[in-house]
Structures are given as structure tokens and as C-alpha cells.
Amino acid sequence: MYILQLLGLFVLLSIVVLLIQYYKRRWPVANFPPGPTGWPFIGTILSIRKEVFFRTIADKLIPRYGKIFSLMQDVPIVIVTGYDAINEVFQSNKGFDFASRNEPMYLLQLHNPKKLGLFAADYSERWQQQRRFALLTLRGFGFGKTNFEGKITDEVSLLLSHLKDLASVPQDLSTLLTSGVANVMCDTFLGCHYDHNDIEFQHILHVMEESFEIYGGKKSQLLDFVPISRPFLKQHAQKIIDLNEEWYGFLMSKVSGHQKAFVADSEPRDFIDCYLAKGLEEPDIFTIEDLKYVLSDMFAGSTDTTSNTLKFALLYMVMNPDVHEKVHQESMRVVGTSRLPCLEDRDKMPYTAATIYETQRLATIGPSIPRCATVDTTLAGYSIPKGTNVVCNIWLVHHDSNLWPDPERFDPSRHLNDKGEMVKSPHVLPFGAGRRVCMGETFAKMELFLFFSSLMHRFKFELPPGREPPSLDSAPGFTASPFPFEVLVKEYL
Ligand code: HEM
């Protein structure tokens, strides 16, 4: 009897200690953003059972806790949902307070535990050196300038010739679009070019897309959010490890090929050559391991986002034929029939530019941007300790009915003024902002314009008759992509 009482007391004490420990971790400082308290082992998972956590949780939690609230993963995480607070994170006068990336949770540990490269790196001297070098090198290649235009238009022409060959049977154009965008990056970063039907190329693009998809899925969120789920999700974790191995194996095979053929002081062929040369000058900073992650961030970060934007643009065109027609008419007026659109035409085609901009708003390819506090700081009056993960929910800004009347309606004219000129809004943030702003913004805008305007100039895309309209939602994933859909392709005569 006495032993049983002692055991009961021990269990009770253990629970109390566990709760106190959890409570201390959950509320690291006074005045931390409010949110559900949650429970040891499972955190706040019960409050966020929806499938695409950061896109939808806010419906339930904002009314209760306000626009800035906190959740408990393995560690506390602050979700920022209003434009003003997001602007504070991005453009903070305090400078670099939120310029780091989130602390490695389980998934990041699996593929980049040292937080190397560009996207996952903390705000540090090393990250600054990598970013500066990558930007300077790409500028040297003409990246973001008109002399890079030729590389893109070559790919556009190739894509158009593939579309010409398509018979009038419904087609999913997803693979063709991704291949076109990826080839521009292959040329720049890896020094190679693939046929669209090449099996190795298609396989590796599939691996890349599957990785993005799997990272945003429900099981991956569980792995990050709920540590006790990990023993039950070993197969899923292994799948992620396998995909990582294939992806990085592909990139490293390109690097080792370059290493074998590398001749110091000779004209660099591509980004890898430039990096290897830099590595000779500063071997401790520009290592092969760093290169692996820099390449991955630039290549995957650009291909997935740009091709997904184009896929959504195509989807919105088939669902809004009047807009499609206006974009086509504008290109015929400005460009005529004898050539394809070029960058010089961009300023003369405001309706097309507004259509791309509206696509970026409505689709929001990067719905939640992860950052991390570099110092003890404040946000909208709340205390945020150093090392706190902060996620900016851009999707909600882009869909806020106070900023966008009828926000779910696809309407490019909301970005045009009375004179028909395109007007940018501070509330459209597809590339993030501030110190960690997307490195490829200028280039992505060039690519989106050239691909999209040329497609609209030459082809009419329609929904196959008698089909259910495709979903306008985005499939689960780290970035937003449309669910598969088919279109009929008709060439304008
Ligand atoms: C439509 C296309 C694109 C979209 C929507 C997009 C979106 C984004 C977003 C939202 C971020 C995070 C920004 C922040 O934290 O404030 C980002 C970062 C980044 N993007 Fe892009 N991106 C696109 C194209 C590209 C391209 C073409 C490249 C490279 C050629 C690129 C390379 C990067 C890199 C390296 C980072 C990490 C920067 C850092 O953390 O220092 N992106 N992008």
C-alpha cells in the first residue's frame, strides 16, 4: 500500500515537473505573443489540424488571439499575419532583427543541419559572403539584364515549338513549363542543356517537385511539430532522406564533372566554374559543401517558383478567357505578328504586366516566409527572444478583403490606374522584402514576362469541353502549385 502511494506521488510529481518544463518552453518570456497553450509532447497540434497549416489556421486563431499569435512546435513559433507587422519583420528600422532563417527543426536537420547556402543560412558573415558572391557572379553573366534575354528567349522558342506539335487533345503542360524554366537555370548554373524528353532531366525535375510537395505535406508537418510522431513516421522520413540524396547527388555529379575539367585562370563556363575559382582564393568560405547548398537554393528555388507561377497564370487564363483575350490583343497591338515579345515591349504592355502581378497576388507561390530573430527584440509590442522562429503569412495579406475588394476574384485591372498604367502595391510581396529579399526577383520578372507574353501571343488555351472546371486551390507543398489540369492548345493563325 505504502509503495503504491509512493508510486502515485512519484507519477504526480513527474507530471507536474513535465508541465512546468513545457510551460516554461512554451512561454519563454513575459509578453510573448498569445496562442493556445497546448500540451507536452503534442504542442499545439490539436489547434491546427487543417491540412495546409499556415494558409488556413489563421481563420480559427486570429479571431481568438489577434493577428500575431504563437504556436508550439518542438519550440515556440510566432505567426505574423497583418501587413503592418509583416512589414515590421521585413523592413524593420531595427535593421537585422529578423534577418535569420528559422532554427533547424527536424526536416531541416535532415538535409541541411549546418544551415549552409543561401536560403536556410542564418544572418552571418558567411551568408553575406555567399550572397554577395552569387549576386555579383550572376550580374557578371548579365543576369537580370537584357543581355541575358537571349538565353530565355531560346528556351521560350523551344517551348513554343513543342506546343505547336501538340495535337488538339487535352494536355497537362506542367512538365513542359517546368522543363523550359529549368533549362535556363541548367545553362547558367550547371553548364548543361537538356532535351525536354531526356529521362535523367525529367527524373530529376520530378525529384525536385516531389521534395517541395512532401515538405509541405501533412506528415512532414507532423514530423516538425510533434516529436513523438517521429518513430511512427520513419518511412516518411526515409522517403525525404532518399529524395535529398538523389537531388544533392545530381548536383554533386555536376560539380565533380566541373572539378575534373577545371583549369584555373581560364574563362569560366558557368556559375560552378566561378565558384570553384573563388574557392581557390578563399578555401575556408567557398567550400564544395557550401557550393552544394548554394546551387540547390538557386536552381530549385528559381525553377519551382517560376514554373509554378506560370502554371497558375495558365490556369487563370483558361478560367478567365476575357483576360486571356485582352492579353493576347495587347501583344498583337504592341508586338505585331512578325516576332515574339521582348523585354523592350514590357513597359508598353501594362495589361500583361498587371495580369502577371495579379497571378502572383492570387496564387502566392511563397505563402509563408520563415524568418528567425537574430537578437532579443520586439514585434508590434510583443517580446520576441533571440532564436524565435517567425513565420510571415503572406497569403493572408494577398487575400485580405480590407486591401483587395473581392480578393478571390482574378482581376488584373485592380493594378491599373485611370490612364491604364500598371501601379504596384506595397501589399503585393511575392518575393518577400528587406535583407533576405529573393535574390532572383529581377530575373524572375524577366522570365515570367517573356514566357507568359509569348505563350499568350502565339496560343489560345482553353478548357477541354465537357470537363469539370479545375480546382483553383493550391496543392499542399512548401511552395504553392496548382493541382494537375489539362488544356486544349490552339495556335493563333
Ligand atoms: C516567381 C519566382 C520567385 C518567387 C515567387 C520567389 C520567392 C522568394 C521568396 C518569398 C523568398 C524569401 C524572401 C524573404 O525571406 O524575404 C525567396 C528567397 C530566395 N530566392 Fe526566390 N523567388 C522566385 C525566383 C527566384 C529565382 C529566379 C532565383 C535565383 C535565380 C531565386 C533565388 C532565391 C534565393 C537564393 C533566396 C534566398 C535568399 C536569402 O535568404 O538570402 N528565387 N524567393
Image: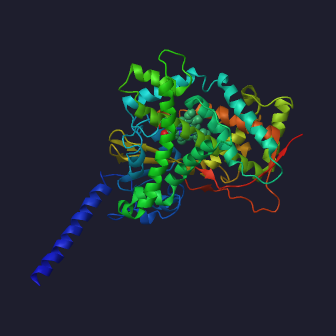
- The image shows residue 322, relative to residue 230, as above or below, that is above
Say which quarter of the image contains residue 372. top left
Q: At which x and y percent is residue 297?
A: 50, 38
Which quadrant of the render holds ligand 1?
A: top right
- Give the quadrant of the C terminus: top right
Q: At which x and y percent is residue 486?
A: 74, 54
Q: Residue furthest bottom?
A: 1
Q: At which x and y percent is residue 353?
A: 71, 36
Q: Is residue 431 visible?
A: no
Left of 245 or right of it: where is 469?
A: right
Quick one: 233 or 459, which is closer to the camera? Answer: 233
Q: Residue furthest front?
A: 260
Q: At which x and y percent is residue 158?
A: 74, 35
Left of 53 or right of it: where is 95?
A: left
Left of 371 or right of it: where is 13?
A: left
Quick one: 384 or 366, which is closer to the camera? Answer: 366
The residue under the point 66% across, 22% down is 147
The residue under the point 75% across, 37% down is 453
Q: Is residue 90 visible?
A: yes
The residue under the point 75% across, 34% down is 157
Q: Residue furthest top?
A: 265
Quick one: 77 or 465, which is closer to the camera? Answer: 465
The residue under the point 41% across, 43% down is 112
Q: Residue furthest right?
A: 493
